[in-house]
Amino acid sequence: MEYLSKQRFDELLTELNYLIDVVYPEVRENVAETSAQGDRSENAGYREARRIQAKTISRIKFLQRVLENSRVIDPEALPKDRVCLLSTVEFTNLATNTRMKFQIVSPHEMNLEAGKISLKSPIGAALMGKKVGEIAEAQVPSGTLRLKIESITLD
């Protein structure tokens, strides 16, 4: 079971509908056109069309599985005093005295450039359930990070 924000659920649903309603019919038509061009064994266009078709079908099936196994999070039901999914956490790396700020999201919403880390990442997992002032220890490839939680907000 995955938990998604309403925004991300809607984005995935929009992508799925676009793939089914627009992209796949075009891909299917392209396969039929290239197939009609003769010997398939030496038809590079046909092989490429089939590869694109397989990739499109794979993405459709993946999105269907994600959406079937996902639930939209009700932000009102989440705790405000602890780090949880959709929390924006500001913390200090005690080894370098560097302050960072990230929102904790599901793996399907992760985007480091947008300041979103997965709750399944080492840092995200270490922060989960902690309160302001507590220290979380995250096991990362370079060692153990000690992170002091400075603030928690729920967006």
Image (tube, rainbow, N blue to C red):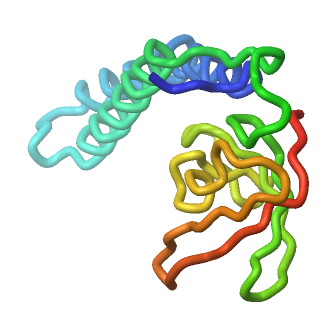
Is residue 148 rendered to the left or right of residue 51? Answer: right
Residue 92 locus on image (x, y percent): 82, 72
Q: Residue at x 84, y 52 (%)?
A: 132
Image quarter (top left, top right, bottom left or bottom right) of the C terminus: top right
Q: Nearer the viewer, residue 31 or 112?
A: 112
| Residue 19 to residue 109: above or below | above
Image quarter (top left, top right, bottom left or bottom right) of the N terminus: top left
Q: Nearer the viewer, residue 23 or 68?
A: 68
Residue 129 locus on image (x, y percent): 66, 42
Residue 73, quarter of picture: top right
Residue 134 locus on image (x, y percent): 75, 58
Q: Residue at x 64, y 46 (%)?
A: 128
Residue 66 locus on image (x, y percent): 46, 24
Q: Nearer the viewer, residue 44 or 112?
A: 112
Q: Nearer the viewer, residue 84 or 57?
A: 84
Q: Residue at x 74, y 19 (%)?
A: 6
* Number of marks present in the image shown: 0
| Residue 47 to residue 16: above or below | below
Is residue 2 rendered to the left or right of residue 73? Answer: left
Residue furthest to the front in view is: 134
Is residue 83 rendered to the left or right of residue 39? Answer: right
Residue furthest to the bottom in view is: 96
Q: Residue at x 32, y 27 (%)?
A: 31
